[in-house]
Amino acid sequence: MSFEEYAALARQLAEQRRAGEQHAATESARRRDLHAAVDYLQQRLTAQGHRLDQLGRSIRVDQPPAGSAPGGPAEAAGWPGPPSGSGSGSGPSTAPGTGDGGSDGAAGVPGRAGVGAYPELPAGEARLALPTAVSPAGVGVPAQRAAAVDPAVELELARRMADEADRHGQQAEMLAQRPALLPTWSPLARAVAVYAACGAAAGMLVLALVLASGVGLVDGFTLGAWICAGLPAVAFFGGYLVLGRWGRPAMVAGTPPRYLPLGFLICFLLVPMAYCAYLLLVRGLR
């Protein structure tokens, strides 16, 4: 081999070495980027999990206890065993498949040799009895090896799913910041509607008291006390409790306003006004 051939071979080896080093550096940088993306995605998913836990506690949704699902450890632990005897109490019961009068014992445990639980298979048949994948095209098709996946593609899919989870989480937070009662209304309009509804209900009770007073069941002093103080106070506290129970969002910082002076004014004006309207109506009809 001539010197020129040695020199060409040396240049080729040097080029291959540089290409290998460059490929190794590129692969190392790619792995560093992948590890950084995985760490960032893990931190993001952890923050999402904490936020979902906060949402669950805010809307009073508890996770089911471990083992409560059907077939879980809790159900298996509480599953009743075979009866210890017959109805007359004469001797132990026979287990199915054993043929003798004793309990199944070790025969109920798969894999125990010589106890008659499951028959032993020869080596050839054991190889044929290996688990196979069930496909829609047919039964008994051997499971194929999964194709290699690109980590970058999987990370991109995970990132998109995390973005979707963030979007749904924001929607859940927006819904949790709305009360169950009149969610699209402003707090002031909701309070006015609640106090007015409670005052209207108290006004209907005023009419019932007026009718009862007309037949002599209620005297004038009791009627006046209920109209001026009793029913307005009941209406006011009823609206206050309704706003506190159904007018409060699941997620809110502090206590939402209930507009107590406005509610007091509405209730203590609406009930006497209902009584005055009833009197004017009666006089107009006469």
Image (tube, helix red, strand yellow):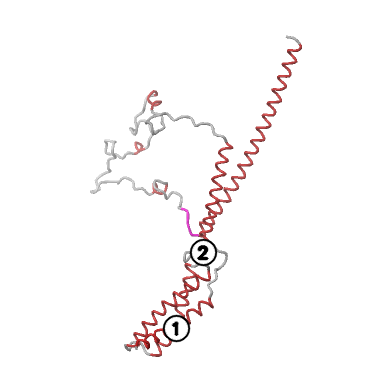
Q: Amino acid at mark 1?
A: Met
Q: Amino acid at mark 2?
A: Pro
**Residue bearing mark 2:** 249
User: In the rendering, at what x and y percent does residue 259 appear?
Assistant: 54, 74
Question: What residue do we see at 37% from left, 90% from top?
Answer: 219
Look at the picture and state if 66 lies above or below 32.
below
Q: Quadrant of residue 110?
A: top left
Look at the picture and state if 261 lies above or below 138.
below
Secondary structure of the residue carrying tag 2 is: loop
**Residue bearing mark 1:** 273
Q: Quadrant of residue 222?
A: bottom left
Q: Is residue 118 left or right of residue 175?
A: left
Disc 2 to disc 1, how far (Cα)? 33 Å
Look at the picture and state if 243 lies above or below 33.
below
Magenta stretch, residue numbers: 59-63
Question: What residue do we see at 25% from left, 46% from top?
Answer: 86
